[in-house]
Amino acid sequence: MHAGRNYTLREVTLWTRRETFVFFLIAGPPTAAYALLDWKWLGLPWLPIALLGTAVAFITGFKNNASYDRAWEARKVWGAIVNSSRIWGSMVIDFVTNLHAQAPVADQVLEDKRRRLVHRHIAWLAALRFQLRQPRVWETQEHKANVEYRQKFEVAEEVGELGDELLDLLAETDCQHVRGKANTATQILATQSHELRELRLAGLIDDFRHMELQKVLSDLYVHQGKCERIKNFPYPRQFATLNLIFVWLFILLAPFGLLPEFAELGKHGEWLTIPFSMLVSWIFHTIDKIGSASENPFEGGANDTPITALSRTIEIDLREMLGEQNVPKPLGPVNHILM
């Protein structure tokens, strides 16, 4: 997520410079042939091209609206994860007691059980964000412009290892249980449920509190499922493909429609076709490119939902609830990018 005031003109220019050069190559040769070789037949009526541009504007706007909806839904889901995580921490600390225990345990044992439940939840957050950062073939981070821009910041899930984080948060038996599973995050939540059952059987939580804690686990399953839906179901490829074809069709035709329009301005007026065709093409293509850069909010790009920073915020809150001293620092933006 970009956490600054705005992207700079230099950043936008560098991000789109390859396409801008292509637009020059598209507009330059027909303009030169029209002006220097007197190939007037290259000029096309502007009206049908303008109608095509209107259609392209509509379909590109539809794509961008859908992309924004996906990005905003991802942020809402992670806002819900933040709230459910805080609820989980406060409930675990207050509900796991000797109040209904047939054989009360020592305070230190209770403290260890609470800490294990909270740390396991932090491990679930780590597993979920590592899973969400796994690349998909339809994502855009391998594009050259994005690869260049990603040198400005670091994606923790790409340079770190999930196993190392789990070793610091889970008991060895838990690590062995979830390691190698197809969906580590799901298995961690299942382990939480198993432990709640054991606590209920031991009388360390009563029926009502057990149901309330299970309800929070159910909410976490729902949140995870929503994240997986956004991650694993892309913006429909048929719409994305047609939009790409229509945008480039308009870009290819635009110079031929602008030639006779600028030629009416007088001597050498047709040369204005090059800069104005490049400008029109740049606007349409960049709008489409912004939609593509926004439609996958977990891919590790500059416009992502900052799930790493949100996970750190949750971890800080939960560790402070436990009264721990070695609490990590919040994550801040690097070159205005918060991951």
Image (cartoon, rainbow, N blue to C red):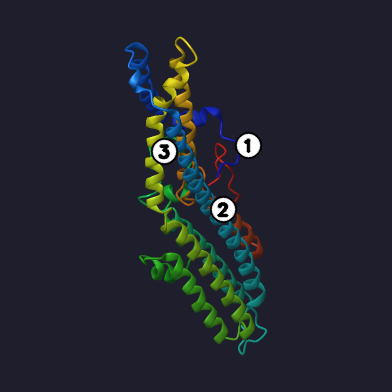
Type of amino acid at the residue the image marks with label 3: Val
Q: Amino acid at mark 1?
A: Arg
Residue of label 1? 5
Sequence order check: which comes first, mark 2 or mark 1? 1
SS for callout 2: helix
Note whether 224 is above or below 280 in the view shown: below
Q: Mark 2, residues whose alpha carbon is within 10 Å: few (<14), some, or many (≥20)?
A: some
Is the residue 104 above or below the residue 327 in the image? Answer: below
What is the C-alpha distance between the residues marked 3 and 1?
A: 29 Å
Number of marks in the rendered image: 3
Mark 3 to mark 2 CA distance (whole Å): 25 Å
The residue sitting at 59% across, 76% down in the picture is 213
* Residue assigned mark 3: 247
Tag of residue 72: 2
Amino acid type shown at disc 2: Trp
Q: Answer yes or no: do the residues labelled 3 and 2 have beta carbons within 8 Å?
A: no
Q: Is residue 239 found left or right of 87 in the rendered image?
A: left
- Camera-nearest residue between 166 and 36: 36
Residue depicted at 37% across the width and 27% down the height: 22
**Element under disc 1:** loop
Which percent across, then down, holds residue 107?
A: 64, 76
Looking at the image, residue 44 sits to the left or right of residue 80; the answer is left
| Residue 18 point in image, percent of width and height | 40, 29
